[in-house]
Image (spheres, rainbow, N blue to C red):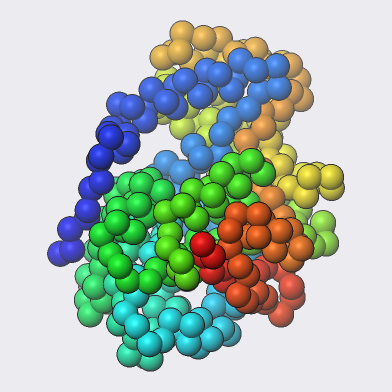
Amino acid sequence: MTTVLEIQDNCQIKSQHDEKSEFKKDVQAGLSKQQKQLTSKYFYDARGSELFNKITTIPDYYLTQSECEILHTNKNKISEFMAGEAFNLVELGPGDASKTQIIMQQFLNDNLTFRYTPIDISLKSLTMLMQRFDREFSNINITPIHADYLQGLTWQSDHSHRRNIVLFLGSSIGNFGPEATNMFFKNLWDILHQDDLLLIGFDLKKDISVLLRAYNDSLGITRDFNLNLLLRINRELGGNFDINKFNHYATYNVYTNAMESYLLSKQQQSVEIESLQTKIVFEAYEPIHTEFSYKYDINLIENIAAANGFRVVKNFKDRKDYFINSLWRVEK
Ligand code: AVI
């Protein structure tokens, strides 16, 4: 069984205790604001990750199907970019790596020499991934790294002189605000070497009805995913949220080009959170903001790449022009 590499320099990997106290602090701060908010990074506990995996399979949530189509259609071209030398296939937040397997299988068919390095902050999801890979892809060299993305990449970059192709799939970048996005790319650029590649997913601006359907799916899974944030507060912080008294609401902001998700209190109510020793008062229809999902166009993608030291090598789109996987090269 492949072992997971733990990177704990500077104690950057948070212990469960640190994670819980950070969650507590963020919930306290977010729910005390005049405009209440919770951070979308807290969606992904075990149940939230399970619900998100379900979301990726439903037809209304077109993002995953569009990205799979792009990877299937262009896997040969992506493989051609990597031919000729041994390289590292590094993935930030692999999830179940089902999309990665599309490319990986092509690399294997083309007899390319590579090592797969999935980097994830969740040890549980890395371990599950490794168990599956040990069963299904025992011929692939893997170095799973349990660390935050930048820390894991730094380790990788310091320990291997091979060229890297970094995958950041699924429009995860869309959940960062504009400032955090630039900061993330600047850090990536600092860590990576000249000519390293980045293959990144961006969800494109499109007809608003399609966006609204994706974030208000007819099966109600996105609603459960959003409400799970309140259940997580109940489970981990001793809250007494009654999720029947909140509605999921997702809307599109035409000025910022982001889907915005909220939980709306259906009535005036107060909620107690034991471990915060706090009572939170909600007015009827008062919102809690829970997520931004930014949408892009080609100009914006090219500008973000150029502003952060990358050159766009190729944009791969699906047939409906819903999604882009953009291949960037590091220019130093
Ligand atoms: C993970 N992330 C890219 C998803 C998105 O589309 O913003 C999370 C999600 N939120 C609601 N549905 C899916």
Image spot of residue 184 (x, y percent): 53, 47
Q: Which is nearer the eye, 91 or 25? A: 91
Q: What is the residue that sits farthest to the left in this orientation? A: 1
Q: Which is nearer the eye, 31 or 114? A: 114
Residue sitting at 39 percent across and 84 percent down? Answer: 107
Residue sitting at 30 percent across and 53 percent down? Answer: 155
Q: In the visual, does 167 lie left or right of 33?
A: left
Q: In the visual, does 161 lie left or right of 168?
A: left
* The N terminus - image quarter: bottom left
Q: In the visual, does 220 lie left or right of 3?
A: right
Using the image, determine if residue 325 lies above or below residue 93: below
Residue 113 at least partly seen: yes
Residue 234 at least partly seen: no
Using the image, determine if residue 54 lies above or below residue 273: below
Q: What is the residue that sits farthest to the bottom in this orientation? A: 110
Image spot of residue 66 (x, y percent): 63, 72
Residue sitting at 67 percent across and 44 percent down? Answer: 178
Image spot of residue 317 (x, y percent): 67, 75
Residue sitting at 62 percent across and 76 percent down? Answer: 314
Find residue 247 and report its image quarter. Answer: top right
Image spot of residue 98 (x, y percent): 43, 69
Q: Which is nearer the eye, 190 or 156? A: 190
